Image (cartoon, grey):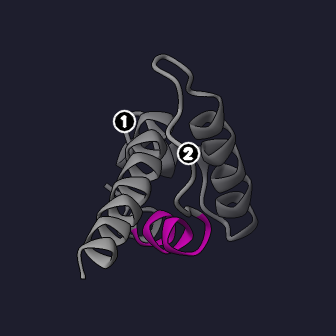
Amino acid sequence: MSERAISFVEQWVDENVHPEAYEREGDTSRAEAMAAYCRVAAKAEGITDAELNESFEDLTAFMAGQLEEATDREVDRLVDKDRS
């Protein structure tokens, strides 16, 4: 695994993945776009596709999970806010 690639992707996710509406079941278009944008940004930093592929078996699936987690956290935050 490439620690450099993992660190880059984690930072990129922190800066670029925000809560949005949940994707419809089976729709991966937003995750695919995010993975593509991340790959372009990584390449600009000198991180190769090989490094990304070695570190993330499926970058699109990883992005899908990150998008869902961001939305879940926002929903939880709003529910907690509503309860107080």
Q: Find the residue positioned furthest to the top.
A: 26
The tag earlier along the polypeptide, 2 or 1, is 2
Give the quarter of the image for residue 45: bottom right
Callout 2 secondary element: loop
Amino acid marked by disc 1: Glu
Image location (x, y in percent) of residue 5: 46, 63
Looking at the image, which residue is at 71% across and 62% down? 41
Q: Residue furthest bottom?
A: 84
For the stretch drawn in magenta, the main secondary structure is helix
The quarter of the image holding the C terminus is bottom left
Horizontal and vertical percent for residue 65? 37, 44
Q: Residue at x 65, y 29 (%)?
A: 29
Q: Which residue is mark 1?
A: 57
Residue behind mark 2: 21
Residue drawn at 32 percent across, 78 percent down: 81
Question: What range is drawn magenta here?
Answer: 7-16
Q: Residues within 10 Å of mark 2 (few under 14, many from 20)?
A: few
| Position of 51 relative to 82 (above/below) | above
Closer to us: 15 or 53 = 15
Residue 17 lies, in percent from the top left, at 55, 62
The answer for how far apart the CA atoms under marks 2 and 1 are is: 25 Å
The amino acid pointed to by label 2 is Ala
